């Protein structure tokens, strides 16, 4: 048996999880059930079996083990935004099938995340949404901008020194 205890007094159970107990006891009789849970987890997630860049349509096409195919524009994915077609010709699938890698760009994408519409990190996605909002030219935005201008514009940043 072994006991695993973190420095904070919390026992680490895995990536991003912890429990309040002070120790974790494992034994060899628990290992087969852990393998079984891991196999169920892996079979439940989407895995890539083939991936290529479709030059004609300008899309990355990912074929999944479920025989479903998904495609997206490289301009919409983190690390691929400014990629040239020649940089997208070489794409590798991770051994687990959960990741796709673009060696010429040193960029990775997580396949289960692609199915959920995540084409990058949370921070990157938020920045992209902010860019879209900032480019908005709605009537309400123009009216608010004019009203703000009549009040003297955007307040100056106060610097403390």
Image (cartoon, rainbow, N blue to C red):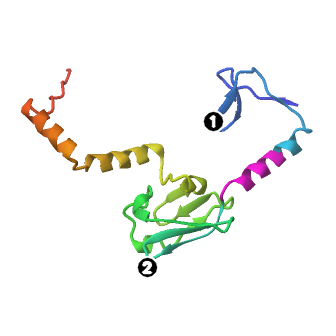
Q: Nearer the viewer, residue 93 or 143?
A: 143
Q: Is residue 62 above or below residue 77?
A: below
Residue 42 on the magenta span: yes
Q: Is residue 12 above or below residue 71?
A: above
Q: Name the quadrant of the N terminus.
A: top right
Local packing at callout 1 (Cα closer than 10 Å; few below 14, some 14-19, many 20+) is few
Residue extending farthest right: 29
The Cα–Cα distance between marks 1 and 2, rounded to whole angstroms, is 41 Å
Q: Which residue is mark 1?
A: 16
Identify the secondary structure beneath mark 2: loop
Local packing at callout 2 (Cα closer than 10 Å; few below 14, some 14-19, many 20+) is few
Q: Name the quadrant of the C terminus.
A: top left
Q: Is residue 53 left or right of residue 149?
A: right
Q: Residue at x 18, y 24 (%)?
A: 158
Nearest-to-viewer mark from 1 and 2: 2
Q: Is residue 133 left or right of residue 107?
A: left
Instruction: Give x and y (percent) for residue 145.
Output: 15, 39
Q: Is residue 159 left or right of residue 40?
A: left
Q: Is residue 33 left or right of residue 147?
A: right
On residue 128, the disc is none
Residue 13 lies in quadrant: top right
The magenta-colored residue range is 35-46
Q: Residue at x 15, y 29 (%)?
A: 155
Q: Residue at x 74, y 49 (%)?
A: 41
Instruction: Give x and y (percent) for residue 10.
Output: 68, 23
Instruction: Give x and y (percent) for residue 19.
Output: 70, 26
Q: Main secondary structure of the magenta part?
A: helix
Instruction: Give x and y (percent) for residue 96.
Output: 69, 58
On residue 56, the disc is 2
Identify the secondary structure beneath mark 1: loop
């Amino acid at each position: 048996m072994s006991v695993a205890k973190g420095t904070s007094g919390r026992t680490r159970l895995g990536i991003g999880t912890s429990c309040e107990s002070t120790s974790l006891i494992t034994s060899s009789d628990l290992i087969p059930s852990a393998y079984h849970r891991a196999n169920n987890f892996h079979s439940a997630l989407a895995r890539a079996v083939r991936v290529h860049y479709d030059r004609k349509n300008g899309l990355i096409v990912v074929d999944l083990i479920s025989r479903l195919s998904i495609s997206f524009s490289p301009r919409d994915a983190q690390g691929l935004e400014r990629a040239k077609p020649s940089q997208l010709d070489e794409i590798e699938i991770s051994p687990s099938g959960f990741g796709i890698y673009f060696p010429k760009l040193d960029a990775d994408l997580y396949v289960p995340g692609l199915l959920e519409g995540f084409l990058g990190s949370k921070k990157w996605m938020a920045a992209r949404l902010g860019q879209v909002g900032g480019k908005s030219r709605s009537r309400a935005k123009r009216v608010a901008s004019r009203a703000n201008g009549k009040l003297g514009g955007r307040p100056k940043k106060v610097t403390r020194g």
